[in-house]
Amino acid sequence: MRGAMSEVNPDEVGAIKKAIRDFVEGRAEEKYEPVTKTIAKLEEKLADPAVLSGEREEIEGKIEKEEAKLTGLRDKYEIENWLLDAAKRAQHIQRVTHTPKHMNSKAKGATGFFCNLEEKSIPSTLVSSFSLGSKNTLTDVIGNAAVLDVNKLLQIECNGRTLLSRLIDGDEDFKKALSSTPALASQIYEGLKVFISNRDPVAHSLTKQIYFPVKGNYHLILPLYPSVLVSRVHSQIRSDFFSDEVKEAKEARKKNGYHDCAIHSYPNLVVQSFGGSKPQNISQLNSERGGKSYLLPSLPPSWQSPEIKAPRKSIFTSELYYRKNVKYWVNALGCYLKKTTIDNMNTKYGRDKILAAIVDDILTYAMELRSLPSGWSDSAECQLPDNEKKWLDPFSEKAKSIQDDQWLDRICHNFASTLNNRLKKYHKVEVDGISHAVWKKGLKEEMKMFRWELCDES
């Protein structure tokens, strides 16, 4: 942090001045444009020789009014004048983390409390505004919507720092850039500091703080609206839906291809709106979100297990490879092997990562089959090889009588063979005995690791 006696950096001052000037001039142009267009139309009309003298006087009067309006705007948006006005208006907005008007649009007061991690009172196991961590710099702004331009000014970044952070740190370069007149610069600076000053929270009956008595204490049922936390969640969900990487990953999935980016799903997501056509009346972040907030379902899961269909001839048939996850990862493996031309540690790591996902899904399927009533493989229709009966239905009478010490090796061999065949047939990938050994080893190591739950023998 730079103290009040820090040396002023002329380059920094110049850069900040330019950033402020560009911002103010940009806003001024937005205000000038409709007025100048109106004047141009009136002047064009006035140039028409068919216009009568009475109409001419009326048009000239309108042009005079519009030019006076434009002169007033130019005076208002003169840099120092605008900054002085901004400094006076800064007291009408406040930085907060929790907002009152999300609870009720007529709620008044400043009920926003900054989350000070040193005063944290909520357990880490619960999601709250504290979950954003100590590095979070995002805050919301409430108050008069017509004054939110002051906050936008302070959000300008210059040489890696926002003007707001400079104001908080007491940056002398920022203060110097506000005006060439020291007294005027100090007046603007002190006015802007009101925006970041600590103010006493003011409650309101319409903020609906509901407490419920619990064992001599109270439990807060309806807390204040955590606008900053909501904005962070909104930003994450938007990224998970619409980022360029996610779009590429979805396109790859359509083409049965592979992509490093994960695709997230949010079932039963609800969008809640605040502020109607004027979301800025609620808060700054609400305006940036277009008044939209996402609601995640907070309901107990309703689990319905799909019917488990037992294989008749082998687990390693088309039925396994058409399972959604297995199919996806086998396709991903085929695409990866086709585009990989160099065999090194990095390519082997990528291959093994996909193989691990395939093996994981196969073992999941195996555990589903083991959950079926014992003896399902004893039926006349079931023609599973003995090694698979021993694996998938270990407590059936037939499986108990099977004497086969090599059952694990046979299973892994069959898996490697069927995977090689599918890669050759459907993906046109040239695989050989080395690939066969890799697939076999991948499944075998996982099955050995969990052998205690895959077989009734030690």
Image (spheres, grey):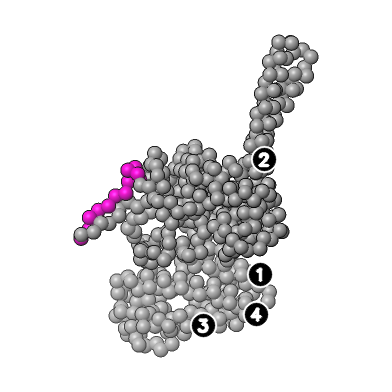
Q: CA distance from mark 4 to mark 1?
A: 14 Å
Q: Position of residue 222 (x, y in %)?
A: 32, 51
- Say which mark, if any, is on residue 441: 3
Callout 4–callout 1 Cβ contact below 8 Å: no
* Image location (x, y in percent) of residue 375: 30, 74
Q: CA distance from mark 4 to mark 3?
A: 18 Å
Relative image position of residue 452 (x, y in whole percent): 36, 83
Type of amino acid under label 3:
Lys
Decide if residue 243 is in sight here: no
**How many numbered markers are drawn?**
4
Kind of residue at disc 1: Lys
Q: Which mark is residue 344?
A: 4
Q: Which residue lies at the image location 41% right of the left edge and 78% below the top edge?
A: 388
Question: Which region is colored magenta?
Answer: 204-215
Residue 245 sits in quarter: bottom right
As helix, strand or loop, the secondary structure at mark 4 comes to: loop
- Between marks 2 and 3 in the image, the one whose residue lies nearer the viewer: 2
Examine the structure image and report whether residue 214 is included in the region drawn in magenta. yes
Disc 2 crowd rating (10 Å Cα; few below 14, some 14-19, many 20+) is: some
Q: Which residue is mark 2?
A: 78
- In this rendering, the label closer to the viewer, 4 or 1: 4
Left or right: residue 190 compared with residue 449: right
Q: Residue at x 45, y 70 (%)?
A: 361
- Mark 4 vs 3, N-terminal side: 4
Secondary structure, mark 1, is helix
Q: Secondary structure at mark 3?
A: helix
Q: Earlier in the sequence, mark 2 or mark 4?
A: 2
Disc 2 versus disc 4: distance between alpha carbons? 64 Å
Find the distance from the CA under tag 2 to the CA under tag 3: 75 Å
Q: Identify residue for label 1.
A: 339
Q: Is residue 298 left or right of residue 191?
A: left
The residue depicted at 57 percent of the width and 70 percent of the height is 333
